[in-house]
Amino acid sequence: MSAGAKILMILFSMIFTENYVLVKFVAICPFLGVSQNFKSCIGMSGAVIFVMTLASAATYAIYHSLMVPFGLEYLSTIIFILVIAALVQFVEIVLKKYIKPLYNALGIYLPLITTNCAVLAVTLLNISNEYNFLQSCVDGFAAGVGFGLALVLFCGVRKTLERAKPPKAFEGLPITLVAAALTSMTFMGFTGMAEKLFG
Amino acid sequence: MNKEKFETTFKPFLVLVGICVVVTLLLAFTNSITAPVIAKNKAEAEEKTRQSVLAGATAFSQVSCDTESLGVQSVYKDDGGAGYVITAVEKGYKGDVTVTVGVDGSGKIVGLNADVSTETTGVGSRAGGSAYIQKFIGLSGSADSVDTISGATYSSTAVKKGVAAALKAFDAVKGA
Amino acid sequence: MKRKMKILTNGIFKENPVLILVLGCCSTLAISVTVLGGLGMGLALTFVLVGSNVAISLLRKLIPNEIRIPCYVVVIAGFVTLVEMVLEAYMKSIYDSLGIFLPLIVVNCIVLGRAEMFANKNTVGDSFFDGLGMGLGYTMVIVGMAVVRELIGSGTLLGYRIIPEGYQIGIVTQTPGGFFCFACAMAMLIAGLDKKGRKFKPEIGCDGCCGNCNAECTDRKETIGK
């Protein structure tokens, strides 16, 4: 398929059909932990999109320029997580110093992203899917958008949940998980759409 | 430099670098042991699959062709003339379905293996089951005559697409 | 010895990482589809946990406080890569069933959390048993969920067909089923503890884990997600 169609397909599938939280099952911790109020959802999503895109670009560059020529592919896990940690640290410092408003909005979420499973997952999957540079960046961006979408949707679900009266044993975390189950079921409806639309 | 400067500035950096070096050395050592094993296992598994779809084959040699434009992963030719083994990967329901097709010299399918480990057990996995695979044996030219499995559309479509790609690739390389 | 046994059982029951501390949910939900996968993941995690706990405990006097997190990450990532290589070479089927979640052990909250909360403050022996206990507790939960999900969802157990084909509830093996099973497991635990008179309100462990991860985070914890 054409390069443009492939990009669109990556965009669509990362946001919907292969959504990182609701389909792939990564980043559950921040998903459940941060989706309580809308403002933090937006903040966290923004930070995730930012870091994922940068991380995809950075890890791609390092993988292909440094690791492959020296045969160091087996060190990908280590090197990628260090790159992500360093990137997050660096971004935090830069934002704090130069873009104060953005830092105030996103800053507190940045340290939480280092242990966000999805960021490491997207960088590793870029490599195993053998995407080129542009595709990797789009993939990172779209994965972040998908994460944000899931977060925002679930925030709405949780607001409704607050008014519900579940059985005593289900109060709190369990009913939230059941709501997550139903939310992820809705995303199952997107299966195969990417291929049909752009394939 | 005084001791305090050493403690606060250099020591953290040295410790981190030291740990990185030790870890990297350990991993490089382990990699030197495991990498050959991994490569050997992979080659053996692929060879075994190839043998299973083309009975009577003696030894395989890879045919170099433009796999990207043909939409297949690899094409192997039996040195003994029994035919070709073509591997294609198609997107299934949850992950990739690897289809290995054994084709004899005339383009007739003599063997088929579909790796449906990523598909839902009992549902999509039926696309890799012997009942479905049998429908493809003996076909040549195209796989359109085989229906998809209702209830396992994506998985069976992936198998069909893989077979179609393999047959197309055969047409391109036959006689090579 | 008694103290060591206490540490061990703490990780399995009283402070079970998945059900009580609510850490490491990502992998629990994703891998508990088959019993074999669950066992494999549990073993891999236990190995990494024990290894990193021991290593970090050994190095605890040497690692300066400011850079402890990057150091922990390098050590943990080292162990994970080791496990990745060994599994790919000698136990390929387990390697395949774990997929992307094997390297994700690096960011598994349990491993980093225990390093931060236990290994850097305790002796090597204690850290070893803590790692073992936590790992066993995690394995128990993931295998328990896997037994339910594999049986109801695929009708098999360890690959052996138990329920005739066609009678399984496929969705249990998919994402929604995972969330739902975890919800039920939690609810059962809450109800069970409630009967014993112990009020239990689980919160996602990540606030605590990440709060430890970054010193700056703790004073900002108030503003996150509340």
Image (tube, coloured by chain):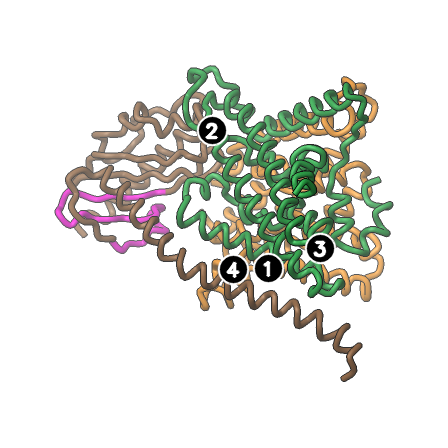
Chain colours: A orange, B brown, C green
Question: Which residue is farthest front?
Answer: C1
Asked if residue C154 can be seen in this view, the reply is yes
Q: Is residue B129 left or right of residue C13?
A: left
Depth order, front residue of A177/B73: A177
Question: CA–CA distance between discs 4 and 3?
Answer: 25 Å
Residue B79 counted in the magenta span: yes
Question: CA–CA distance between discs 2 and 3?
Answer: 43 Å
Magenta region: which residues? Answer: B63-88
| Residue located beneath label 2 in the image | B120
Q: Which amino acid lies under the numbered mark 3 shown in the image of this protein?
A: Asn
Q: Point out the frontmost of discs 4 and 3.
A: 3
What chain is tagged by disc 3?
C
- Mark 2 nearby-residue class (10 Å; few <14, some 14–19, many ≥20): many
Residue name at image x 62 percent, y 53 percent: C54
| Residue located beneath label 1 in the image | A57
Asked if residue A54 can be seen in this view, the reply is no
Q: Position of residue C40 (x, y in %)?
A: 50, 39
| Residue located beneath label 3 in the image | C120
Question: CA–CA distance between discs 3 and 1?
Answer: 34 Å
Question: CA–CA distance between discs 4 and 2?
Answer: 32 Å
Q: Position of residue B132 (x, y in %)?
A: 32, 25
